[in-house]
Amino acid sequence: MKKLIIALFCGAVSLSATAGGNIANGEALVKKRTCATCHGADFNKPTDPSYPRLAGQHADYLKHALVAYKRGDGPNGRNNPIMGAFVKDLSNQDMADIAAYLHSLPSDLVLKR
């Protein structure tokens, strides 16, 4: 019984680590896609005030936004031709990795009060 409990615990821990995203892979994907061109070199100072600051943002929000851009027009989608082109070939894991990386960056965003 004790071995079963340990096995279940280890499985749950590894599942949550996978679901959280790989920060190193996320960093590589962000650099490859030149996201800093619009969102700023440190992802804290976008080149246009209408672009969001991404550093330190909640990972689940970031992943949801990427998925919505991939959906495009229609229910629960976001229509932006630039972002749509950037996320078109990303897998769900790629989007989780990008979200984990951006979330890990230092930021002055107020996430809690």
Image: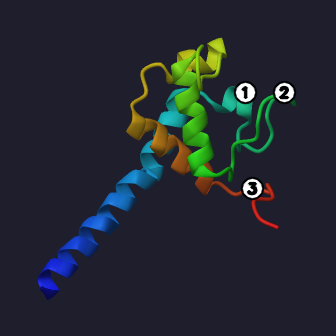
Mark 2 highlights which residue? 48
Gap in angstroms between the C-alphas marked 3 and 1: 17 Å
Numbered disc 2: secondary structure: loop
Q: Is residue 46 above or below residue 97?
A: above
Residue shown at 12%/85% (left/top)? 1
Query: Looking at this rendering, what residue extends furthest in the bottom direction?
Result: 2
Q: Position of residue 51 (x, y in %)?
A: 78, 30
Q: Which is nearer the N-term, disc 1 or disc 2?
A: 1
- For marks 2 and 3 on the same chain, the one whose residue lies earlier in the sequence: 2
The outermost residue toward the front is 75
Q: Which residue is rendered at x = 81% and y = 59% of the image? A: 110
Q: Within 10 Å of the Cα at label 2, are there few (<14), some (14-19), or many (20+) other Cα atoms?
A: few
The residue at the point 79 percent across, 55 percent down is 109
- Label 1: few (<14), some (14–19) or many (≥20) C-alpha neighbours in 10 Å: some
Q: Is residue 103 left or right of residue 50?
A: left
User: Compared with residue 78, is residue 5 higher up or lower down, i.e. above or below?
Assistant: below
Q: Secondary structure at mark 1?
A: helix
Q: Is residue 69 left or right of residue 2?
A: right
The answer to which image quadrant residue 45 occupies is top right
**Residue topped by disc 3:** 107
Q: Under tag 3, what secondary structure?
A: loop
* Residue type at tag 1: Cys
**Circle number at residue 38:** 1
